[in-house]
């Protein structure tokens, strides 16, 4: 997007201002307080609906609604309009303070403008002195923030966090599903009377039950197969409320749990648990590490580019939190191993607890039905003990707080006389309930198994589904990490290369081997630059303020170039060269012309020299410089366009106003001679205060011009370039005539006499003076590109006088004599 | 120029690279990638609930028809 016309009404210090850049670059020149930055604010408001200067640190109490408008303007009168060119299409856009969120534009260009607005809102379009400070001289975290804002890293981090959070949530769900599946499988095992699920063993038991019912064996045990082709046993005379056969099998299961082998295995688990707990007792910090392990992992996922602690939001230096968590995770590795031992032990012990509770539950119901009160109470006590045991081993805190003394494990163990007492209870139950037939027992077992198998099938399916989601989430997370690293590393590399290239272009004289590093570091961005081959350092460590400003401009341009190519061509540079010396300002102007030919620059400056350097570099022509002479409350910026000096003078002469024309001619010649001396490196009488009169500068510029032309002629002669020599001689003749035409040298000698004398001339007479001076001034400009010719030196030896386009090129180096 | 997502912003470049990598994985359902693209277009990739919603509505049909 480029700006053709810009109309500003009642923004900040501007009442009404119309500018006509015509898609070309524009320089707004004026003293401090003249309203230059209000133009930047207006562009900012038009593109973003905000004025960035009125937000951020130190702007408490300042609002767009109240302070964005001219002090006594109504919001409805605060308006910025522009005719813009986007992708070859020209249309009008506008924004009013009444609806500051709404950019008015033709509907067919809405999507294009949305993209442009989005980029502008990230700050891709404007660089001010304030941003330079943030880029270069501020703390590294602030700098990173500034760069990250341009790159929109915050959004990238938000996406990363959302993806990681989604993966964590699904992983947590997966753990729950696994636990549910395991519990359902244990229940099926209990129903089958086996300790560990084995398909073949399960099938054998099922087929045994089926055989009892006269059924044929099945080869698989899906739910619908269990009772395939089986008929229920005949009707019973009276319902059997307690199946002794089932209870008997539960007793077998309890016996197994309290069998020597199982106790031995459990003892081993206890030993491992004890060993782990001993380690914890020796190093209590492990408990904290174990508790923090999950938190550390979540914390790593939640870290963002701000460097803030994700928990307490306290800001730390970049990379600090990441390093801290990495270190904590390393220390927690031992804790992690201990945690694995504890989890395994818990799992094994919990299995025993679940099976005991299952058996006790069946017996509890049977004793209740049989009215065996004391047995029922005893079983109830064991159930409670067993539940407490399971609940305790579920709670990590209880485990960790156990001492390593064996006695303390009583909590984890159950009375070993349970099997014996249960046998007695079973014997009592036998006298209350008739024994079931084997057929009825087999049918009941298959019925129970059906229910448990159904639950297991559901749990398996749920687990399979969540496992699938988990696999996808993990792939998205890993592939996003890879994509993020690849894109950012490539971007940083390219931006850094371009930055160094631009910076070297500005500082080729003193830092031709300059290089820089821009790389992700922790959550931020590390930016280091070479200092004259003496290692890389932060940009504000050793370089001068002027060099830092150059870096800020170059880094911004490199970033903006990468991010807005082909979309937002407009780049606003608001007074960005305050600390850059005059030589490097000229270089910057040349660099903008050379390296950014397809961008539209809006540059504000209070520095006339810089403005003219930009004109001389060909970035703008004289019509591209808008000058504010001052500001007043009623009118806003006092505007006078330096369109074309000669055109303005002619306008004055057309009105018969010789006085105004003479004043303009003198001011114009002062500016011209100042830059001509600079450009051709003419010798000028030294003045400590830097105040030179026209009489000091113009003769020096002319003398240097003549001298360089003489050298060019001599050089052409030495190379025997007769045609060139003839051309230069002819040009020399022309120069002499131009200079002699009005004896310009003499005009300069005593300005107090001669300039005053101008006002006594008639318009026609003064017209000759103007023509003479215009012919003289035109000698110093290229007829093709319009840039001011300049001296090129090599090792302080003049080699050429040339213009920016190369059309004007005098060789000054003579052929070496043999 | 098209929708906001199509801006060659850094975020867009990263998401494009992600979708490309996911597209090369035969075990990922193309419809899932389309749904994620839709999320990106509407700026909802910053919402973990939305991502979970997309993942958990995946039918599991992949390039290989599994």
Image (cartoon, coloured by chain):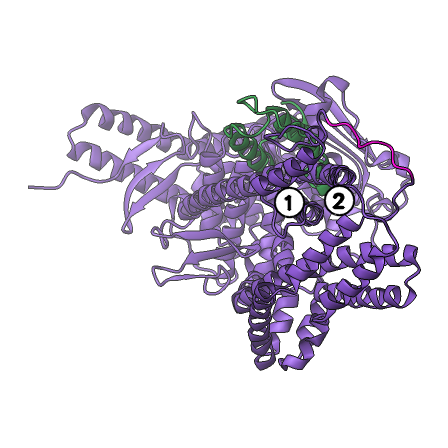
Q: How would you classify the magenta stretch by its main secondary structure?
A: loop
Residue at disc 2, secondary structure = loop
Say which chain tag 2 marks.
A
Position of B57 compared to A729: left or right? right
Residue at disc 1, secondary structure = helix
Position of A623 compared to A11: left or right? left
Alpha-carbon distance for marks 1 and 2? 39 Å
Q: What residue occupies the far left of the structure in this picture? A: A818
Closer to the camera, A590 or A412? A412
Q: Identify the residue at horizontal 66%, vertical 67% (top origin).
A: A291
Q: Residues within 10 Å of mark 2 (few under 14, many from 20)?
A: many
Q: Identify the residue at horizontal 87%, vertical 47% (top origin).
A: A71
Q: Give the colour chain B carries in the figure.
A: green
Give residue A167's mark: 1
Q: Which contiguous range is marked in magenta?
A: A230-237
- Residue B7 location, x and y as percent? 61, 30
Label 1 vs 2, first from the N-terminus: 2
Q: Quadrant of residue A715?
A: top left
Position of A744 compared to A722: left or right? right
Q: Which chain is purple?
A: A
Eyeballing the image, is A686 above or below A88? below
Closer to the camera, A538 or A433? A433
Say which chain tag 1 marks.
A
Give residue A569's mark: none
Q: Is residue A129 visible?
A: no
Q: Is residue A738 visible?
A: yes
Q: Quadrant of residue A258?
A: bottom right
For the N terminus of chain A, the image quarter is top right
Q: Residues within 10 Å of mark 1 (few under 14, many from 20)?
A: many
| Residue placed under numbered mark 2 in the picture | A51
1 or 2: mark nearer the eye: 1
């Amino acid at each position: 997007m480029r700006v053709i016309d810009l109309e500003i009404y009642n923004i900040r210090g501007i009442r009404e201002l119309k500018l006509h850049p015509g898609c070309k670059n524009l320089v707004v020149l004026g003293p401090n307080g003249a309203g230059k930055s209000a133009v930047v604010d207006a562009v900012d408001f038009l593109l973003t609906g905000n004025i960035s200067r009125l937000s951020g640190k130190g702007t408490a109490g300042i609002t767009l609604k109240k302070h964005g408008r001219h002090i006594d303007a109504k919001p409805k009168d605060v308006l910025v309009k522009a005719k813009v060119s986007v992708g070859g299409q020209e249309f009008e856009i506008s924004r009013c303070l009444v609806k500051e969120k709404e950019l008015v534009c033709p509907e067919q260009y809405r999507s294009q403008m949305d993209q442009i607005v989005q980029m502008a809102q990230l700050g891709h379009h404007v660089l001010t002195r304030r941003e330079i400070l943030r880029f270069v001289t501020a703390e590294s975290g602030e700098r990173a923030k500034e760069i990250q804002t341009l790159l929109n890293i915050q959004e990238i981090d938000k996406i990363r966090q959302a993806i990681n959070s989604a993966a964590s949530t699904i992983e947590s769900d997966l753990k729950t599903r696994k636990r549910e599946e395991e519990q359902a499988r244990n229940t099926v095992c209990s129903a089958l009377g086996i300790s560990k699920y084995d398909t073949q063993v399960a099938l054998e038991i099922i087929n045994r039950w089926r055989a009892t019912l006269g059924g044929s064996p099945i080869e698989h045990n899906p739910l619908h197969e269990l009772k395939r082709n089986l008929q229920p046993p005949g009707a019973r005379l009276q319902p059997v409320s307690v199946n002794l056969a089932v209870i008997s099998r539960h007793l077998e299961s309890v016996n197994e749990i309290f069998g020597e082998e199982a106790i031995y295995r459990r003892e081993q688990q206890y030993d491992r648990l004890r060993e782990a707990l001993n380690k914890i007792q020796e190093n209590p910090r492990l408990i904290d590490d174990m508790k923090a392990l999950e938190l550390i992992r979540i914390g790593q996922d939640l870290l963002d580019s701000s460097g803030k602690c994700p928990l307490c939001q306290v800001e730390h230096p970049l990379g600090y939190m990441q390093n801290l968590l990495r270190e904590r995770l390393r220390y927690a590795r031992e804790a992690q191993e201990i945690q694995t031992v504890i989890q395994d032990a818990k799992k094994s012990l919990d299995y025993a607890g679940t099976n005991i509770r299952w058996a006790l539950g069946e017996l509890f119901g049977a004793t209740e039905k049989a009215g065996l009160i004391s047995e029922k109470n005893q079983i109830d006590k064991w159930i409670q003990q067993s539940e407490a045991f399971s609940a305790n081993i579920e709670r990590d805190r209880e485990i960790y707080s156990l001492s390593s003394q064996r006695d303390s494990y009583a909590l984890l163990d159950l009375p070993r006389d349970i099997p014996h007492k249960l046998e007695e209870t079973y014997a009592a139950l036998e006298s209350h309930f008739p024994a079931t037939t084997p057929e009825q027992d087999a049918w009941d077992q298959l019925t129970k198994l059906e229910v448990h198998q159904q639950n297991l099938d559901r749990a398996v399916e749920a687990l399979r589904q969540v496992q699938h989601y988990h696999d996808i989430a993990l792939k998205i997370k890993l592939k996003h990490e890879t994509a993020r690293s690849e894109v950012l590393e490539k971007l940083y590399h390219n931006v850094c290369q371009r930055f160094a290239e631009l910076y070297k272009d500005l500082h080729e004289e003193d830092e031709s081997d300059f290089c820089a590093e821009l790389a992700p570091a922790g959550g931020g961005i590390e930016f280091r630059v070479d200092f004259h081959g003496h290692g890389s350092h932060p940009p504000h460590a050793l370089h001068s303020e002027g060099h830092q400003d150059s870096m800020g401009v170059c880094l911004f341009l490199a970033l903006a170039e990468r991010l807005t190519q082909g979309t937002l061509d407009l780049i606003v540079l608001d007074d960005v060269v305050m600390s850059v010396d005059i030589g490097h300002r000229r270089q910057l102007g040349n660099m903008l012309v050379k390296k950014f030919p397809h961008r539209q620059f809006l540059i504000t400056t209070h520095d006339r020299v810089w403005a003219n350097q930009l004109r001389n570099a060909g970035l703008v022509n004289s019509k591209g410089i808008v000058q504010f002479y001052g500001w007043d409350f009623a009118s806003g910026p006092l505007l006078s366009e330096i369109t074309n000096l000669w055109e303005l003078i002619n306008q004055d002469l057309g009105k018969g106003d010789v006085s105004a024309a003479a004043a303009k001619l003198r001011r114009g010649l002062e500016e011209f001679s100042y830059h001509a001396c600079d450009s051709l490196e003419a010798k000028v009488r030294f003045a400590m205060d830097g105040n030179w009169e026209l009489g000091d500068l113009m003769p020096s510029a002319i003398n240097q011009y003549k001298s360089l032309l003489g050298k060019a002629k001599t050089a052409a002669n030495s190379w025997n370039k007769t045609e060139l020599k003839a051309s230069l001689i002819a040009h020399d003749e022309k120069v002499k005539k131009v200079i002699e035409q009005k004896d310009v040298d003499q005009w300069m000698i005593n300005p107090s006499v001669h300039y005053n004398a101008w006002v006594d001339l008639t318009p026609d007479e003064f017209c000759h003076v103007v023509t003479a001076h215009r012919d003289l001034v035109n000698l110093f400009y290229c007829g093709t590109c319009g840039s001011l010719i300049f001296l090129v030196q090599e090792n302080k030896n003049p080699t050429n006088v040339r213009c920016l386009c190369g059309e004007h090129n005098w060789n000054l180096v003579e052929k070496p004599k043999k | 120029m098209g929708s906001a997502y199509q801006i060659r912003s850094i975020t867009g470049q990263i998401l494009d690279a992600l979708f490309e990598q996911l597209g090369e994985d035969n075990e990922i359902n193309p419809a899932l990638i389309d749904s994620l693209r839709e999320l990106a277009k509407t700026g909802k990739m910053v919402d973990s609930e939305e991502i979970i919603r997309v993942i958990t509505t995946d039918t599991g049909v992949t390039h290989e028809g599994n």
